[in-house]
Image: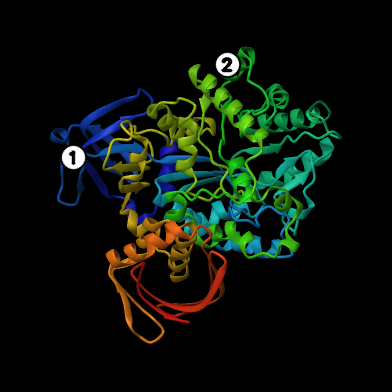
Amino acid sequence: MKTYLLLLLLLPLQLLGQTTIIKDVNVLDVERRRIIKNTSIVISDGVIDKIEKFKKIKISEKDNVIDGKGRFMIPGLIDAHIHFFQSGGLYTRPDALDLREIVSYEEEVEFANTNVRDYLKRYLRNGITTVIDVGGPMWNFQVRDSIAQSITGPNVLVTGPLFSMVDRPKLDIGDPPIIEVSTKQEVLNLFNKQLPYRPDFIKVWYVVTQENPAEKTFPLVEYLAKLCKENNLKLAVHATELQTAQLAVKAGADILVHSIDDEIIPESFIKELKDEEITYIPTLTVMDGYIKAFTGEIQHTKEDLTWANPLAYNTLLDPNKIAKTLWPPQLKSMYGKDRPAIFNQMDSIMLVNLANLSEVEVTIATGTDAGNIGTMHASSYFKELLAMKKAGLSNWELLLYSTLNPAKGFGISDKIGSIKTGKRADVILLDKNPIEDIENLNAISLIIKSGKPLKPESILIETLEQVVQRQVNAYNARNIDAFIDAYSDDIKIYNETGELIMEGLDQMRKQYAGMFESVTNLYCEIENRIVINNKVIDKEKVRFNESFVDAVAVYEVSNGKIKQVNFIK
């Protein structure tokens, strides 16, 4: 009863008293791995009230009845590992890639703070109705308690700064996301600092160095686990080595937030993970994001070009314009080279471990580690699912790991994670069956958040600058479909004399597709940008093979699409 009343308090006032009925829909039961065909869902006061045949439901004139015939309903997806303080762009982790001479860390953090609402909308637009930030500045609590409450967005779980075994001074500009603790008193002080803010869990960065081997810092992790148990908080641990993960579980960890990537997990430890009900979050693709950025081999996915924050994503190609004299050692040593073999080996180990854990039904939860360099908020989720599928996981398993399992792992499965009476109505209506093809998760017809039906196109309204930058990103990626998608059907393009040189998407496609195929090092740099009313004016420097062209482009935007371009050379 207390849980139900709490849910009511969390819902927008306008939803109270409303009833929505999804008629004759196919409901995916992720727990029992079955499809309940042609049933109906009654949603009242933001909660699933009934699941039964439509003919048994009493309908009033005030009820909102939505036809679900031929469609498929799944629980809202959950990203169990993100970081709001990171943008996913090239400048977001100066402790890993120090480009502060180009963009200060203060500017980067301001960008991340400014765009949190944008990130939240992108998550919800992609059917991700819950996100879990596993460590950041104290400002994280403001995201959960204020910013997330001010918009229609996903549920947000957060914790504060990471309890770390190592220092990260480059990230400390007053509200550090990572704080080194070297004594039990320092552990207690940081714990007591976070406790009044009601963290949803606690996170430790159990990083191993020669100076601080896992055995040396084990007492600190064990002490922190004790504090968590005393305060009914789960402990999440960053532990990527087998030995460190074993010690973390011995200390009292509840959640391992990354894959074990140095050794194949022995059967004895797999059994321990199962018996202790440890949640395992693989985060298979986050390191790949770093490597792709460091080597310059960005693989532009459809999701990134469509749904990533365009301004953050654009920075991943900034080595094209940064003078090489300013490149840090990581770029100088890796850019333009093949992926290091050691990371291929780590990938293989992670996939084997995931397959073995899945086989015995260890609680696995999907998480992206979004915000790290090359891992964009919201758009990276599908990439993670495809990587998990490479371990031989079925689509039913992928859905379970992306819905109910993370809810279980973080102690909120009584509220969300599956489609059951009494649970919050966070559900997604799909036009196609994701069990037949996991890509059908992109075929979103309707998103219902806390009982409120939302058309996907109504959730995320990009700014003029974002629309224009999105087409620049697609241009630099030489992706004709993503490029054309930024333009209206009746697009008109004029040259510097005012002559109409292109009209309509078909003509644009023919004109640009050939160029994208033939010019392999195409790159457009925006040297200056002005936004006036519904126009974006860009001063551009475009590289074609070995030649450069300077131009000014005036983009006129309407209803989220570019409807006219005037080029001035």
Considering depth in this image, is 228 or 499 the residue closer to the camera?
499
Q: Is residue 190 left or right of residue 289?
A: right
Considering depth in this image, is 18 or 353 the residue closer to the camera?
353
Local packing at callout 1 (Cα closer than 10 Å; few below 14, some 14-19, many 20+) is: some
Local packing at callout 2 (Cα closer than 10 Å; few below 14, some 14-19, many 20+) is: few
Residue 486 appears anywhere in the view: yes
Label 1 amino acid? Answer: Lys
Q: Is residue 293 left or right of residue 161?
A: left
Label 2 amino acid? Answer: Asp
Sequence-earlier tag: 2 or 1: 1
Q: Is residue 534 left or right of residue 115?
A: left
Name which residue lies at 50% across and 22% down.
358
Name which residue lies at 37% across and 42% down.
426
Name which residue lies at 50% across and 16% down.
360
Query: Which element is circle 2 on?
Result: helix
Which numbered tag is attached to residue 69? 1
Q: Quadrant of residue 525?
A: bottom right
Q: Nearer the viewer, mark 2 or mark 1?
A: 1
- Residue 495 position (above or below residue 479): below
Across and down, in percent, residue 381 comes to 48, 43
Circle 2 residue:
275
Name which residue lies at 42% across and 27% down.
397
Across and down, in percent, residue 533 comes to 42, 80
Across and down, in percent, residue 462 comes to 42, 64
